[in-house]
Image: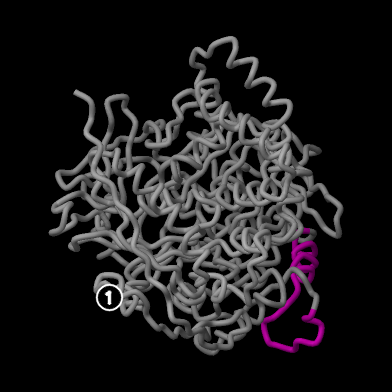
Amino acid sequence: MQKTFPQWLAHHARTRPTATAMREKEYGIWQALTWADLALMVEQLAAGLHQAGLRRNDHMVVVGANRPRLYATMLAVQSLGAVPIPLYQDAAAPECVFPINNAGVCFAFAEDQEQVDKLLEVRAQCPQLAHIYFDDPRGLRNYDVPGLAALDELLAAGKACVQIHPDLVKDEVAVGRPNDVGAMFFTSGTTGNPKGVVHTHFSLLNRALAGAEFDKLTHAEEVLAYLPPAWIGQNIFSYAQWLACGYVVNCPESASTVTIDLKEIGPTYYFAPPRVFEGLLTSVMIRMEDAGALKRKMFHAFMAVAQRVGPALQDGLPVSLGDRVLYGLGNVLVYGPLRNTLGLSRVRVAYTAGEAIGPDLFSFYRSIGINLKQLYGSTETAVFVCLQPDNQARADTVGVPCAGVEIKVADNGEILVKSPGLLKEYYKNPAATAEVLTADGWYHTSDAGFIDAHGHLKIIDRVKDVGRLKGGAFNDAMFAPKYVENKLKFFQHIKEVVAYGDGREKVCVLINIDFDAVGNWAERRNLPYAGYTDLAQKPQVYELIKECVEKVNADLSADALLAGSQISRFLVLHKELDADDGELTRTNKVRRGFIADKYQVLVDALYEGKTSQFIETVVKFEDGRTGSVSATLRIADTQTFAPVKAAA
């Protein structure tokens, strides 16, 4: 029988009341919350919200990190037939105005003082925002603001209400239907205002169950919820699948303790975008550079074995006895301790999604015994469109369509999807809805790709980003910027890349160095620097990055389709790309068009053959102040290689 989110909660509270539903780390100690305790909290919150005036089909925003009370508030909202809207906790105050006004939001949950201040700052622009409830009272004791109250007050009011009307919430939950609107997620808004993606209980839970069945998930799984709840990926893995499967969700103490908490929990089911896996690998490589010569030599020797043998072992392919023995020894000396250091020693299934992962990065994790796989989906598809079977995880595909999904490729190469998990609509935006949903139920993904001979989907890039070089040695060659960017980002010294080349005769890139990795590299060479801008422009750093670029060029030359995407020139940016400066989305995706406009003078300098260019950029600090960063940036040429002809 199909259920709503609150009905799943009631099911677990009834059948497994004393089982742990969530854990939260507070003051260094893990606190457990059972399904029965959670259900009671949700009931009291729902009753309190009903008394305050929240009604069926109303909207309520929730802003904060993963916390049991945030999850309980979302469930309480859904219990009343209202719709929760998670917003990014690191979004600047002005970014909250459009979602709140677009959805006519009157109620808000704010985790702490930072989020309360943000909502109060925009209240003049959102006059209908009458009720703001906060969880953490620190710093808020002396706030005297109409409509601002502690969540504890709401719980107390709800408790009193339940005593008088014991069936109030239960009756509301009972009338809920799977096709009711369950949640709304606002897209990143890479162009124009964000769009509210409307999902039903059915669309979210259907995909959650399809993913759970595919990977044989049970209530015994342990998950660490550390990514923004406003991101559909985190919401599916730690909310929809959590309720559908009944496993344990663990909430870290803070963003700074995630690595420690990861090791303590030892999740069995793990999910992260490529950027997180890149960061974990970078930390490992930094530590290895600091290790003794013998340890480094052993690490690199066994990693060579892992890269040669590990993926085959993961995929169940035949491996010689000698290689098995060598890999087993490596597992004892290197791979096992490395998995433990990463906090991934108990992982049974790990997924990466959000954007394409570099093939070398993907192979690294599988080679050391981590069952890392890729999936394909989006906010509009409730994440699960394609998944990789355990023994068919390949770096260049995103898997096979999962249960209930149909895929076809349009004449222009765009992937079209039909699935039970498709959005209901874009809220109050019928024109945008009509652009992506056809009358017969196909969703336009805007991704270019094809289905290979094994039935796996390959994604090349966004349709609008796949281009052609014009003129030069590679005239009319395909250019896929994301593919080039991801190959460069495998190197631990490179954090972000923006590639340009469509309609031009060559490819040029803007690069962000990884400040921690390059800083560590510089310190070991006694190379002094006064900050990111200074370090980024050191000649030695340019040589380091040039080596990385030319290795990528050598790899690309062996790819018949993408040999033309080799990089001819590059520069290292004087600042890190930042979502607060509009250069990245809140999910850390590059806003390539915005960056091209903002740094037009740099892009022009790359293509005009200049060897340097002065730039001054306005930046926004965390406290809302603005300043400027200026520098004269070096521009470097790189070696490109003739395409390697395939053997006859």
Q: Amino acid at mark 1?
A: Asp
Q: Which residue is mark 1?
A: 604
Q: Position of residue 295 (x, y in %)?
A: 72, 38
Q: Position of residue 620 (x, y in %)?
A: 54, 82
Q: Position of residue 262 (x, y in %)?
A: 72, 46
Residue 42 is covered by the magenta coloring:
no
* Res 176 seen here: yes
The quadrant holding residue 217 is: top right
Q: Residue at x 32, y 69 (%)?
A: 593
For residue 338, side relative to residue 500 (left or right): right
The magenta span reads 139-162
240 or 415: which is nearer to us? 415
607 or 137: which is nearer to us? 607
Reply above or below: 292 against 611: above
Q: Residue at x 26, y 72 (%)?
A: 609
Q: Residue at x 70, y 80 (%)?
A: 148
Q: Residue at x 61, y 58 (%)?
A: 517
How busy is the neighbourhood of tag 1: few (under 14 within 10 Å), some, or many (20 plus)? few
Residue 148 is covered by the magenta coloring:
yes
